[in-house]
Image (spheres, helix red, strand yellow):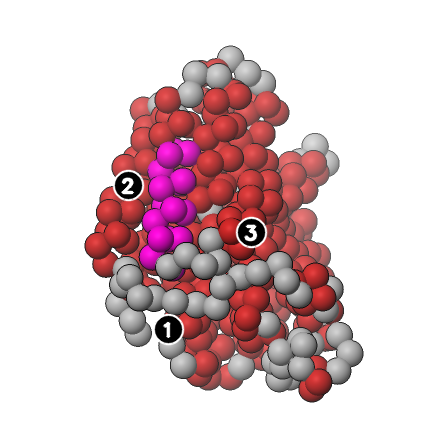
Amino acid sequence: MPPVLYLFALCNLVIGSGAFVLGGILVPISESLNISLAAAGQVMTAYAVSTAVIAPVLIVATARWPRKHVVQLALALFTAGCLVCALSDNLSVLLLGRVLMGAGGMFSAAASALAVSLVAPALRGRALSITFLGMSISYAVGVPVGAWLGFEYGWRVPVWLSAGASLVMLVAASWLVPANMVTAGASFAGFGATARQGAVLRTWLRTLLYFIAIFSVFAYIGPVLQALNTMSSTQLSITLAVFGAAGVAGTLSGGWANDRFGSLPTMRTQLSVLILTMLVLPLTRGHLYATMATLIVWGIAGFGLMAPQQSRLAGLAPAQAPLLLSLNGSMLYVGTALGAVVSGSVLGHLHLWQLGWVGAPFGLLALLTLAFEPAQVRPVGSSAAGSP
């Protein structure tokens, strides 16, 4: 695999950690800025909206730029956003920083488009799994560690660390990303017709439902685990580390399975196992090792979907891949936000340890979308595509 893909994985680790860590430290943020917890929660909404709206526009605006410059712009925006957040003394400035960070989230789409252009189609899944590996690690390790730092030393500490790490990635990308890397430039020309195709819409919907399912539990993963089993902080850290390792294995195996068996069989298996583990997780209450075993299976199955999803989407409209992948990333962030909203809205009626049962129906809906997919990916504009 091209070595630059591992740099992209590190960049996604930094971006994912910085993007989501604030969700775990809303209490110290609200206390520091003297705002309500609900108001502090707007930092997650601001990031999601910015990534969903501004990042795709930037992908199109930079379509004719050398890809190295696009990567540099994304990392520069993310770094600047982290710095603004770290220096903020009121909610308005903090939200401005989050908007800048969200705009920098265009990196993930740009990196994904580059990844699929650097390898043969038969290796596309593995290339994307490496690129997304950092994002998986950030969910399972970077965010919990950052949250711990935020509670122990103040919420600005993990934000400063994110800014520093992002700056290091910017320097590394400026040095290591070849200047001659190219992909098809994104354009809004013809995009409307492409985006209205059923295959594209179903892919975006599947990403949205998938992340609602996962984050209905993951948004509260620490409290959920402690509600399932009484555990020390050390046991909690070990459990999260095991979950993170399983997530890394899942991301890599998802890319391999996509290339070996195809995207549809891979996604059917992943979503089926994810649904099963979410149904079983609440039943492991009071049995720590059963909880850990379930989390291992969940990590392997639950973190591997993005590689086949991205690979399938890139195959549907290769010329529009950067923009389609950017909007797929938007669905990711919107799904994470909605997952937290869904689980938060039912906590007055259910216990934390029961949240797996809240997420499972969304996983089932994601699985059902696969029933409408053809076995072979065909460009949506081709005559072979037929009806959407």
Q: Nearer the viewer, residue 376 or 63?
A: 63
Residue at image x 31%, y 54%? 10
Q: Earlier in the sequence, mark 1 or mark 2?
A: 1
Q: Earlier in the sequence, mark 3 or mark 2?
A: 3
Question: Along the horizontal axis of the image, is 170 left or right of 132?
Answer: left
Instruction: Please say if the residues under marks 1 and 3 sit with CB atoms less than 8 Å apart.
Output: no
Please name the amino acid that badge 3 sits on: Pro
Residue at image x 59%, y 36%? 45
Question: Along the horizontal axis of the image, is 376 left or right of 60?
Answer: right
User: Of the residues tagged 3 and 2, which is closer to the observer?
Assistant: 3
* Viewport quadrant of the N terminus: bottom left
Instruction: Please say if the residues under marks 1 and 2 sit with CB atoms less than 8 Å apart.
Output: no
Label 1 crowd bin: few (<14), some (14–19), many (20+), radius 10 Å: some
Q: Nearer the viewer, residue 290 or 195?
A: 195
Please name the amino acid that badge 2 sits on: Leu
Q: Position of residue 271 (x, y in %)?
A: 60, 67
Instruction: Please say if the residues under marks 3 and 2 sit with CB atoms less than 8 Å apart.
Output: no
Q: Secondary structure at mark 2?
A: helix
Please name the amino acid that badge 1 sits on: Leu
Q: Which residue is mark 3?
A: 56
Q: Nearer the viewer, residue 18 or 58?
A: 58
Taking the view exactly as shown, the residue that stands out farthest to the bottom is 384
Q: Which residue is mark 1?
A: 118
Question: Along the horizontal axis of the image, is 210 left or right of 243?
Answer: right
Q: Which residues are magenta?
A: 67-82
Q: Position of residue 238 (x, y in %)?
A: 34, 48
Q: Secondary structure at mark 1?
A: helix
Taking the view exactly as shown, the residue that stands out farthest to the left is 175
Taking the view exactly as shown, the residue that stands out farthest to the right is 387
Q: Secondary structure at mark 3?
A: helix
Marking on residue 167? 2
